[in-house]
Amino acid sequence: MGKALDATGLIGMIALAGIMVRNSILLVDFARNKIAMGMPVREAVLRASKTRMRPILLTALAVILGESVLCLDPLLQGLGYALVFGGLVSTSLTLGIVPVAYYQLETLRVSKRTLSVRQQPPTDF
């Protein structure tokens, strides 16, 4: 946008991190609860993504539309740009990268656990 990152932009990035990290945590927590109830990892991640997509999009839309007015203010323009464009990027990461990364890490963890259980020698008492 041709604007240097200033103090208000940094404040916007901090505020945005709080909002969007919370969305990612809620998405992963939802999937973990489903896995703990016995649901397969793939289905749990898909269900968590489907269930949490609407609240995540509504939160992002509220931030983007609510803070877009700041893009017109010369003093708070950095804050507006950080919140609007950061909201777009972080929402796409939350809905795209977080579920895929969690699925990959969870399947890797489950496969390591089952592999280590199989390799243990039987104990005779």
Image: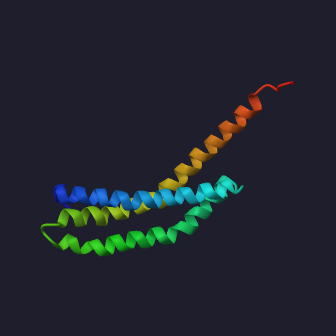
Q: Residue at x 24, y 67 (%)?
A: 80
- Residue 48, percent from left and from top: 58, 62
Name the side, left or right, on which 24 lies relative to 108: left
Residue nearest the observer in this picture, 63 or 72: 63
Up/down of 39 relative to 122, above or below: below
Query: Going by the picture, which residue comes out furthest to the right?
Result: 125
Please state, as top left, top right, bottom left or bottom right, where the N terminus lies in the image: bottom left
- Residue 56, percent from left and from top: 46, 67
Please state, as top left, top right, bottom left or bottom right, where the C terminus lies in the image: top right
Residue nearest the observer in this picture, 91 or 28: 28
Up/down of 103 relative to 88, above or below: above
Name the side, left or right, on which 116 lies relative to 46: right
Q: Residue at x 57, y 45 (%)?
A: 105
Name the side, left or right, on which 18 lies relative to 97: left
Q: How is the image coloured?
A: rainbow
Query: Going by the picture, which residue comes out furthest to the front?
Result: 125
Up/down of 125 relative to 46, above or below: above
- Residue 14, percent from left and from top: 30, 56
Name the side, left or right, on which 76 lies relative to 12: left
Q: Residue at x 63, y 45 (%)?
A: 107
Up/down of 112 relative to 31, above or below: above
Could you say which quadrant of the image residue 118 lies in?
Answer: top right
Residue nearest the observer in this picture, 106 or 14: 14
Q: Residue at x 30, y 67 (%)?
A: 84
Q: How many marks?
A: 0
Query: Going by the picture, which residue comes out furthest to the left?
Result: 74
